[in-house]
Image (tube, rainbow, N blue to C red):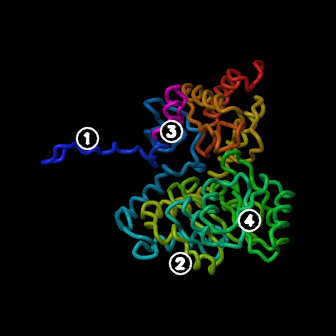
């Protein structure tokens, strides 16, 4: 490019702009979603036009919902919606600040007291989301020179909490107590260490070996934290979770839970000793620097706890449905892994087959979630099914018929199965 200055007889050469690397280049190069959409197998961001019931409307099609974490079918419960609306009428739609400063309402304090009592701990602390609960707790508790020992299948938010921590992360083979002990034995005896595990593993539906973990924690001087997002409302007396299921609540130092599964809202909490909760109130950055949970969400959880106590038959129906569906899949010949909860995986294997099977089921009228790497290891893609207390026997029987057709079509079952 040349430019001739005013009053000059000669042109000045101006160099062309140099194209430098941009942080946005990776966005333009990211074509995986478009590729999947072009193949008709993009399973994400589906718009659900109705509430989280056993049947939902998606793109104008009625589908049987087998992909919701509303295990007790409480998100549309009349009493819980009423509690949420009452809170909005009294407090408005938001708190306009963090709990640390101007965002604490009486119902926040009430909920924390009820959660502590429900979980069998001295105190509890409510976070705006479950993700922030894990990132805030783990990053605040484990410092440089200290260790986090985590199952290889821990949830992504636990992993992010580990990454935000300045401690050292050591991972043990999934639910393998021999490997956990081997890893613990290598850590300096005097170094503080926190063992972190899911209670119910959210992709494959198996339960952690909490008795083994507690035994090793006591042997090697470690503390134990259980992420019970998928255990609360499902396991233990009255739905109190994995620690209650095993009778080990007193031996588990920290119990984390979310509101977005059985408790019909959004948010998370951590329950533990009063001193630990006091520390986290004043140190955990995701708690201190995030706006507090909305009045409607907090009131909905209070309502959910009331309904769980008043309607214990919901948990019973949940387990009846889970056992029926799991047995049905096993009898047909599907590989359901080591599932022992209402989360039931159908092991498919390869990415392409999993996506095509998801599309087959969608077109037949079943809403499920495909789980592919990095959510699971390569070669272990699966269809994740979650049953709820609200499903009828007729719905589940119909689902088994459709799955059997899909299994035969994609070679997961013998033609005679």
Query: Which residue in the structure is indicated by mark 4?
Result: 195
Residue 39 visible (yes or no): yes
Q: Which mark is residue 2?
A: 1
Q: Earlier in the sequence, mark 2 or mark 3?
A: 3
Q: Horizontal and vertical percent for residue 133?
A: 57, 64
Q: Horizontal and vertical percent for residue 162?
A: 64, 62
Front in this rendered view, residue 296 or 353: 353
Query: Which residue in the structure is indicated by mark 3?
Result: 30
Q: Nearer the viewer, mark 2 or mark 1?
A: 1
Magenta span has 347? no
User: How many numbered badges does the structure rendering display?
Assistant: 4
Q: What whole-number distance in Å separates the C-alpha atoms at marks 4 and 2?
A: 23 Å
Write the residue at 74% across / 65% down: 195
Query: Which residue in the structure is indicated by mark 2?
Result: 282
Q: Horizontal and vertical percent for residue 242?
A: 71, 59
- The residues colored magenta run 28-45
Q: What whole-number distance in Å separates the C-alpha atoms at marks 2 and 3?
A: 40 Å
């Amino acid at each position: 490019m040349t430019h001739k200055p005013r009053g000059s007889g000669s042109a000045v050469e101006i160099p062309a702009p140099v194209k430098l690397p941009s942080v946005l280049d990776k966005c333009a190069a990211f074509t995986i979603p478009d590729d999947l959409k072009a193949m008709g197998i993009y399973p994400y961001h589906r718009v659900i036009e109705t509430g989280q019931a056993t049947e939902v409307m998606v793109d104008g099609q009625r589908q049987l919902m087998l992909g919701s974490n509303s295990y007790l079918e409480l998100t549309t419960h009349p009493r819980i919606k009423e509690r949420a609306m009452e809170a909005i009428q009294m407090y408005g739609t938001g708190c306009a600040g963090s709990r640390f400063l101007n965002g604490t309402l009486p119902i926040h304090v009430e909920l924390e007291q009820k959660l502590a009592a429900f979980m069998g701990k001295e105190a509890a602390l409510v976070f705006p989301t479950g993700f922030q609960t894990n990132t805030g707790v783990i990053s605040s508790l484990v410092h440089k020179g200290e260790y986090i020992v985590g199952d290889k299948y821990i949830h992504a938010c636990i992993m992010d909490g580990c990454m935000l921590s300045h401690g050292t992360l050591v991972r043990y083979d999934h639910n393998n107590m021999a490997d956990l002990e081997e890893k613990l034995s290598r850590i300096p005896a005097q170094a503080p260490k926190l063992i972190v595990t899911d209670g119910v593993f959210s992709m494959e539906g198996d339960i952690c070996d909490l008795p083994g973990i507690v035994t090793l924690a006591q042997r090697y001087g470690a503390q134990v934290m259980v992420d019970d997002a998928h255990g609360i409302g499902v396991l233990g007396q009255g739905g109190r979770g994995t620690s209650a299921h095993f009778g080990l609540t007193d031996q588990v130092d920290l119990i984390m839970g979310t509101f977005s599964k059985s408790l019909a809202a959004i948010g998370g909490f951590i329950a533990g000793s009063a001193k630990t909760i006091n520390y986290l109130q004043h140190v955990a950055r995701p708690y201190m620097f995030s706006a507090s949970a909305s009045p409607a969400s907090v009131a909905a959880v209070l309502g959910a706890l009331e309904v769980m106590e008043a309607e214990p038959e919901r948990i019973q129906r949940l387990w009846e449905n889970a056992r029926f569906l799991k047995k049905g899949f096993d009898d047909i010949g599907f590989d359901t892994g080591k599932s022992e909860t209402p989360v039931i995986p159908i092991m498919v294997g390869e990415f392409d087959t999993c996506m095509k099977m998801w599309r087959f089921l969608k077109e037949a009228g079943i809403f499920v979630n495909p789980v592919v790497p990095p959510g699971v290891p390569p070669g272990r893609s699966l269809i994740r099914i979650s049953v709820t207390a609200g499903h009828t026997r007729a719905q589940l029987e119909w689902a088994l018929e459709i799955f059997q057709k899909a299994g035969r079509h994609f070679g997961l079952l013998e033609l005679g199965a």
